[in-house]
Amino acid sequence: MITCSFENGNKASLRHVVVDNLVLQGDKILLVRRSGKLSEGGKWGLPGGFVDRDETIKEAAAREIMEETGYTVADLTLFRIIDTPDRPAEDRQNIAFVHFCIAQERTGTPDWESDRYP
């Protein structure tokens, strides 16, 4: 949950909007290792992350995949939405838009290979 302050002074706890992506490469699914700074750090997971302001869900999915794997993708298709509010073991509550897509070519450098995360 994030706490937001509104113009009228009211505050509210809101959920995060995130994208998770099943990136298919042949008969494999690409996984990424979570940063040690995150909850469940060091575990393997799907490429994904928060939706930025002024960005569509599909734009966020493609951006997160590029940032975390370096791959462009095709056929980005919504698979399901996960909005389970009862997540007592987690420090935040997310609404996750989960996509299927096909890995194309690797044209970028994933964050973990760049200077962004020393």
Image: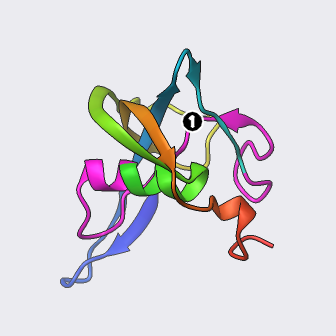
The residue where tag 1 is placed is 46
Q: Is residue 69 visible?
A: yes
Type of amino acid at the residue the image marks with label 1: Leu
Badge 1: how crowded within 10 Å, few (<14), some, or many (20+)? some
Q: Quadrant of the C terminus?
A: bottom right
Q: Residue furthest left?
A: 8
* Residue 66 position within the rendered picture, expressed as x and y whole percent measured from the top left: 49, 55
* Residue 62 position within the rendered picture, expressed as x and y whole percent measured from the top left: 38, 51
For residue 55, what is the image quadrant?
bottom left
* Residue 31 position within the rendered picture, expressed as x and y whole percent measured from the top left: 64, 34
Residue 105 sits above or below residue 21 on the image: below
Residue pictured at 47% horizontal, 29% vertical: 22
Chain part drawn in magenta: 35-61
Q: Is residue 16 visible?
A: no
Residue pictured at 80% horizontal, 43% vertical: 42
Does residue 6 show up magenta in the picture?
Answer: no
For residue 40, what is the image quadrant?
top right
